[in-house]
Amino acid sequence: MEARQLLKALSEAAGVSGFEHGLHPKLQEAFGPWVDDMRIDALGNFIAKKTGPGSPPRPSVMLAAHLDEIGMMVTKIDERGFLRFTRVGGVDQRILPGLEVMVHGRQALPGIIGTKPPHLLAPGEAAKAMKWEDLFIDVGLGADPAQEVVAVGDLVTFARPYTELANGLQSGKAMDDRCGVVAMLICLEWLKRMHFAADVYLVATAQEEIGGKGAIVSTYGLVPDVGLAIDVGHGDSPGVSEDHTFPLDKGPVLGVGPNIHPKVHGLLQKAAKDAGVSVGTEVLPGSSGTDAWLMQVSRDGVPTGIVSIPLRYMHTSVETLSFADVERAGKLLAFFVAAVDGPFVEGLTWS
Amino acid sequence: MKELIRELTQAFGPSGSEAPVRETIDTLIRPLVKEVRTDALGNLIAFRPGTGSGKRVMLAAHMDEIGVIVTAIDDKGFLRFSNIGGVNALALIGTRVVFAGGAAGVIGSEPVDELKDLKLEKLFIDVGASSRAAAEKQVGIGDMAAFHGPFQDLGDRVVAKAMDDRIGCAILVQALRELQDSPHHLIAVFTVQEEVGLRGARTSAYGAEPDVGIALDVTRVGDTPKSRTMEVSMGKGAAIKVKDASLICHVGLRRHLVEVAKAHQIPYQLEVLERGGTDASSIQMARSGVPAGVISIPSRYIHTPSEMVDMADVRSCVQLVVKTLEGPIDL
C-alpha cells in the first residue's frame, strides 16, 4: 500500500489503546513486502524487523511510533438506551458535545454525543464545560435493543472521514501517531535503495496514550543499541504560543532535552543535512511525553532521540498535518538508520 | 467458605507488614501445592505443576491491606499518624485500629468547622494512655495498625475489614482446594504492597515469567443510593474486568473468561472501573509483556473498616477460576 493511502486507511480505522488488533492486518499488508519478520506481542505491539546485510554482531536501531489512538469506552447503558462512557487516553470533553462517534458493539453503530439545547440551559450553565458524567451517546435505540448490540466495555471512536485540505494538508482523527507509523513505512522504502549496516526494528507501539506501555515491554524484549520515537509535535495555530509550536510543511522537529542523547541528536542533525530535509528544534525540558521517555530507561538504559511531525489540533477529531512533513520524516529516518554503524554505537558512551 | 473469609480478613497485614497474614495463608495452602516460597518483598508464591502441556498461569491476590502508621507521640500520649495506602479521613472518625502487637486505639479528631477540613493531620489515635511514657510502652514511631473490623455474617452477604483483598486470597485458596486436574503450571501468588503501588506483583511476575496473568481483586459497584455511574452490581456475578485506571485487560483473555463463564453457566458481568488499579497492571508489564486480566469481586464500602461482598458472587468467582484453570487457555 502506498504511504498516503496507508495514512488515510489508518486514520479512518479504529484502534483505541489496548484494542489495536483491528489495525494489525493493515500493517502486515503494508510492511510485509519491505521487512524480513513481523510479529504481534502480548500487549499488541506490531514489531517488524529488517535485518542488516552484514554478519553479526550488527548494531540495532529501534524505531517506535505508536499505533493506538485516544477514544472512549461504554460504562453503562441506561434505562432509556443512552450510553454512558468514560475516556481512554487524553480525550478533552470540551470537544465532545455534538460530535459524531462510532460505537464498536456487536456491530459498528453510528452515534452522536447529545447535549442540552441552549434554550433549556440554566442561567450560567452555557459558560461551563460539560462534565463527563453529564455526557451521553445516543445511538437511536431504546434500552432493550441497545443491550443486544452494545455491551459495557465496548469502544467508541470519533467518526471522522479523512479530509484533504488545500496545499497538501491532511486532516483526520488519529493522525497522532499513525503519521509516525507511515513515516516508518516511508523509511523502509528509502532503505531499499540505500546502504545500511544495522538491524532495524520498526515498532508500531500499543497503549502509548495510557502510559507508554507498549514501548516499555517492546524495548525490554528488543534491547536496541539506539532508539528513536517518532511522534507528533504541536503545529502552529491562532491562540497558541509560537515558542511551543511549529509551522506545517517546514519539516519535522528534533527534540532536545534530558530524554535525548546528545550523540543521537547529533546524528539526527547530520542525517537531516545529508537527506536535504529542513528540521526545527523542540525543547523538551522534562518528560517528552513520547515512547522515548520509557525506552530510555529500559534495562540498563537506551540512548534515545525524538523526531516529531508538526500537528495542529492534537487530540481532536480534526488533527491536521502536512503530508510532505511525513515524507520528510521518513526520509530523515532512513538517513539516520544508514548512518548507524558499529563505531557510532560504540561511541555512545559518556567518556 | 465463610470461616475461611473470617480467618483471612481478621489476620493483620498492612502493606509492608504482611507477615501475620502470610503465615496464615502459608498454613492453609501448603497441603494444596507442591512448593511454597517467599520472595525478597514478602510475596508468598506457591507452585502447582500441571498435568499436561498447558501454560504458565500466574494468579495473584494481594494480601496487604490499607492501614495507618505512627509518626509522632505527644506528651499526653496521643499518637499522630500517616496513611498506608488509600485511607480516607472521613471514614476514620470513631473507628478503632489494632497494632501488630495487639495494642488497640480509637481515632479521634481535633474540632473542625467543616468536613472538608477533616484531613489526616487533624486526627489522632488514643490508645488509652495518659502520658507519652505510657503510650510508648504499647507503641512506637513507625508501628503500623490495621482497621478493627470484625467479620459479620449478614446471610447472603458478609462484611469485614480488609475484604480488599482477602476475599481475593480466599477465592484463590478455595480454588486451590476445589481444583481437580489442570493442564496448566499454576503459580499462585499472594502479593504484598498492592495498596502502595502494585509493587509485589511487579517483582513476582518478573520472577514467575508467566504466559498468562489473572488478578483477583475487589471492584466498586454502582447499586447503592445515588452512587456514581457504574454497571456492576452486588449479586449479579463475577465481574470480568475490561479496564480500570491502571490497565486495559488483554482482549483475548477477557473474551476467554467470558466464554468460560457462559459455557459453565457462571453468572458474570463486565466491569469498567474508572478509578483504581490492580496487580494485573504490574503483571502485564513484566519483562516483554504478559497477557493479563482480572476477575473482580463486586464490593461495597471499599477502604472502610466495613467492606461488603455477596457470597453468591464469591462462589461465582471461585467457579470461574477453577473452570478457567481446568480447560485450555488459547488466546
Image: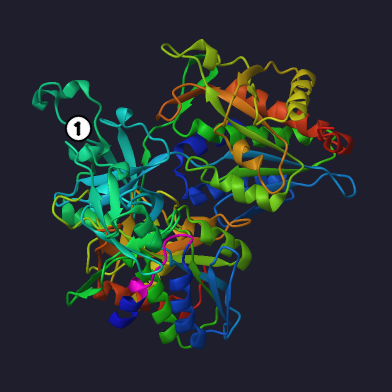
- Residue beneath the point at 25% across and 71% down: B150
Quadrant of residue A318 in the image? top left
Range covered by the magenta-colored residues = B8-16
Residue A187 drawn at (x, y percent) = 70, 33
Above/below status of B220 relative to A15: below
Above/below status of A342 relative to B311: above
Report the quarter where the N terminus of chain A lies.
Answer: top right
Q: Secondary structure at mark 1?
A: loop
Of the residues shown, which amino acid type is indicated by label 1? Thr
Residue A130 drawn at (x, y percent) = 24, 31
Above/below status of A10 relative to A128: below
Q: What secondary structure is the magenta-colored segment mainly? A: loop
Report the quarter where the C terminus of chain A lies.
Answer: top right
- On whether residue A189 falls in the magenta region, the answer is no
Give the labeled residue for mark 1. Answer: A115
> How does the figure colour the protein chain or chains?
rainbow
